[in-house]
Image (cartoon, rainbow, N blue to C red):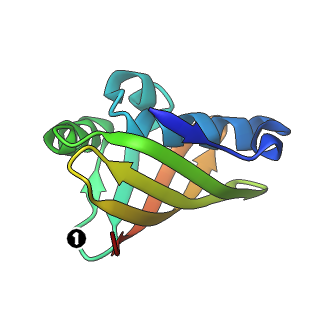
């Protein structure tokens, strides 16, 4: 996968983790990503029902894994306390492009919740 990530996205531990998680999600490296989730993680893909729990989250990601990203651009990662946000674009193997913004809440070093906004971009 082609990566475009600003250099400052790794200058703090939480930024580095969010950067790494974004790459893991885009490439559907599900077991590696799930290692950072709390057992009771909640993933909300805005417009769909929330997904509760690490196993259900992994199942949802596996169901999407047929269309991997061929390019990922991260525009920025912001962190403050237990919260973090990332936004960027993904170019998928099927030719579609998506803009995304993910909002994280952490408990310790585990992800407690992610709220994801995704929109299809013009080709």
Q: Residue at x 80, y 41 (%)?
A: 7
Corner quadrant of residue 35: top left
Quarter holding the C terminus is bottom left
* Horizontal arrangement in the rendering, residue 78 relative to residue 26 (left or right): right
Quarter holding the N terminus is top left
Question: Quick one: 10 or 110, which is closer to the camera?
Answer: 10
Corner quadrant of residue 59: top left
Residue 65, percent from left and from top:
21, 38
Q: Residue at x 58, y 34 (%)?
A: 20
Question: Quick one: 82 or 100, which is closer to the camera?
Answer: 100
* Horizontal arrangement in the rendering, residue 73 relative to residue 13 (left or right): left
Residue 43, percent from left and from top:
36, 56
Corner quadrant of residue 71: top left
Q: Residue at x 58, y 55 (%)?
A: 105
Question: Quick one: 91 or 23, which is closer to the camera?
Answer: 91
Decide: few, some or many residues near mark 1? Use Cα within 10 Å; few <14, some 14-19, many ≥20: few
Q: Which residue is mark 1?
A: 48
Residue 46, percent from left and from top:
33, 73
Q: Residue at x 56, y 38 (%)?
A: 3
Q: Secondary structure at mark 1?
A: loop
The answer to whether residue 39 is seen in the rendering is no
The answer to whether residue 13 is seen in the rendering is yes
């Amino acid at each position: 996968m082609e990566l475009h990530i600003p250099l400052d996205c790794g200058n703090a531990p939480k930024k580095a983790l969010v950067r790494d998680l974004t790459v893991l999600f885009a490439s559907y490296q599900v077991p590696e990503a799930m290692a950072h989730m709390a057992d009771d993680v909640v993933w909300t893909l805005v417009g769909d029902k929330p997904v509760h729990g690490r196993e259900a989250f992994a199942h949802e990601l596996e169901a999407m894994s047929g269309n991997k990203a061929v390019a990922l651009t991260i525009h920025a990662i912001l962190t403050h306390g237990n919260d973090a946000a990332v936004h960027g674009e993904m170019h998928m193997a099927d030719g579609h492009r998506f803009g995304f913004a993910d909002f994280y809440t952490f408990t310790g070093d585990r992800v407690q919740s992610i709220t994801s906004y995704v929109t299809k971009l013009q080709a």
